[in-house]
Image (spheres, coloured by chain):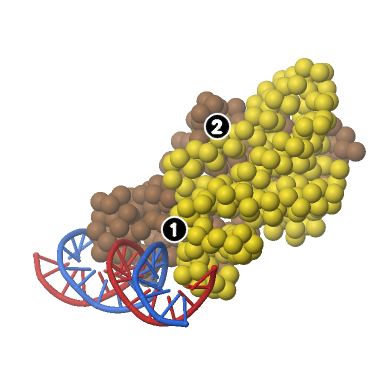
Chain colours: A yellow, B brown, C red, D blue
Amino acid sequence: MTYRDFKKSVDQAKSDLYRETLARHPEAVRVKKEATAVRNLERIFAAALKVANEKGFAAMTLRDLSAATGMSMGALYAYFSSKEELLAMLQEQHRSVTRRILEQALDRRRDPMERLRAAVRIHLYLSEAMQPWFFFAYMEARHLPAAERKKSMESELATEKLFEDLMTEAVAAGALAPRDCRMAASLTKAMVQDWYLKRWKHAGRRITVDQYADAVLDAVESYGKATGH
Amino acid sequence: MTYRDFKKSVDQAKSDLYRETLARHPEAVRVKKEATAVRNLERIFAAALKVANEKGFAAMTLRDLSAATGMSMGALYAYFSSKEELLAMLQEQHRSVTRRILEQALDRRRDPMERLRAAVRIHLYLSEAMQPWFFFAYMEARHLPAAERKKSMESELATEKLFEDLMTEAVAAGALAPRDCRMAASLTKAMVQDWYLKRWKHAGRRITVDQYADAVLDAVESYGKATGH
DNA sequence: GTCTATACACAGATAGAC
DNA sequence: GTCTATCTGTGTATAGAC
C-alpha cells in the first residue's frame, strides 16, 4: 500500500466522524439541524487547528476563531459551551479516528513482520493525512485537565505497546534478532512522531511520507538484525 | 565518560551563565548589585520553567510567577521589561549554554566514530542536566516572534548538521557503511529529543540517561552497519 | 441559528511609598 | 530594590434582537 491509496479511504470516513462527535456532545452543540451542525463543526475545527497550531491554543482567542471561521462569537457558542470543551472535543475526535483506522488496518494481516511494517506505515500515513490533528494533540496535551490528559497518555502508550507486541511476535517467529523490544518500540515511536512534529523540515527537504516510512522501517529492521551486545 | 562526571562540569559553568545573561540585557535588568541580580534571576528562571512547563508559557500569569518566586510583581519587572522579553531571555540562555558545552566537548577528539558517539552522548547528557530548559525551548519555540524563532530553528538544524557531518566522516573513514547521512542524522535527532520530551515515560521505566544513550548509539551503529537497499 | 452589544473577570504593566 | 495599589486593555462568556 502507498499513501495515495490510504488517503482515499480516510477522506471517506471523515464526515461520519463529525456525526459521531455531535452524538457524543449533545449538551454542548445546541444546533439541531444535522447538516448545518456538521458543516459548521468542520469549519470550526479546521480553523481552530490552523490558528492554535500557529500560536498555541491558550494564545488563540475566540475573537481569532470568530475571524478565522467567519462566524460570530455568539454563533460559535452554539457549538461548544466553553473554550475548554472545544479543546476536549478536538482531542477526543483525534483519538477516536486514530484508534479506528489503526485497528481496521491491522485486522487482515497475520505475518508478524508484515503486521509490524503495516503498523508503522499506517501510523505515518494517518499522521500525514491528519497532520494538524496529530500536531495539536501532541503540543496541547499538557493543557488538558487531569482526566483528559490521562486518556491522552494512555492512547499514546497503547500505540507504543502495539509496536512492542508486534516486535516481540516477530522475534518469536525468528524474523528479528532478540532485543529489548520495549526500548526498540519507544525509539520507533520517537521517529514516527518526528514526522508530524517537524513537518516543515521534512517538507523543505522534499521527503515524501513513503520515503520516510521506508527509512524508519529500514532503521527498525537493521536494528533488529544486528546482534545487541 | 558517564553522566555523573558530566554533570559536575555543567553545574560549575552555571553561575557564569547568569552573569552573561545580565551583560546581554543591560537595559532590561535594572538591578545593579550583581550578586542580588544573579540570585534573583536564578529564582525567576527556575520558577518560570517550572510553571511554564506545567501549563505553558502563555497560560502562566505574572501573578503565578510572583507566587512561585515569592517576589512581588513590581520586583519581577526590575528583571525584565515585558513577559515577552522574559521568554527571549530564557531561549537565549538555553541556546548559548548548548552551543558552548557541545563545542568544548568535541574539541579534543579526532576519530570520526568517537566524535559521533561523543556528540550524541553529550547532547543527551546536557538535555538531562538541563531538562526543563530543553523541554521549554522545544515547546515554546512557535510562540517566539519571527526573528527569535528563526534563531531557534537554526540552532536546531545546526545540531542535526553536526550529526550528519560526523556520520559522513565516519563513512569516509570506513567506520560506517554508505547511507543517506542526512536522513540518519534526522532520525537520530528524533530519538535524542524524545529523551527530554517524554521524560515521565522513561523515568517511569527506570531508564537512566546512560542506558538510553547506549540504546540510541546501538541503533545508530546497527543502522550504519547494515547495507541500505 | 446567527447576529450585535455588553457584562465581568483577569491579564500585563506601572506609579509611588518605603 | 521591593512592596502595594491601581490603571487599562483584552479575554471569555452571555443576553436579547432579528
Task: Residue at 25%, 64% (x, y): give it.
Answer: B74
Q: Are marks 1 and 2 in contact (CB under 8 Å)?
A: no
Rendered position, A79 above or below A12: below
Q: Chain of mark 1?
A: A
Q: Element under label 2? A: helix
Q: What residue lies at 57% left-to-right and 49% top-to-bottom? A: A23
* Residue at mark 1: A82
Q: Is residue B3 left or right of residue B120?
A: left
Q: Nearer the viewer, residue B71 or B162?
A: B71
Same chain? Circles 1 and 2: no
- Between B161 and B85, the one lying in front of the other is B85
Q: Nearer the viewer, mark 1 or mark 2?
A: 1
Q: Where residue A80 appears, x then y in whole percent?
A: 49, 58
Question: Mark 1 and mark 2: span between their CA atoms?
Answer: 35 Å
| Label 2 sits on residue | B202
Q: Is residue B214 left or right of residue B199?
A: right
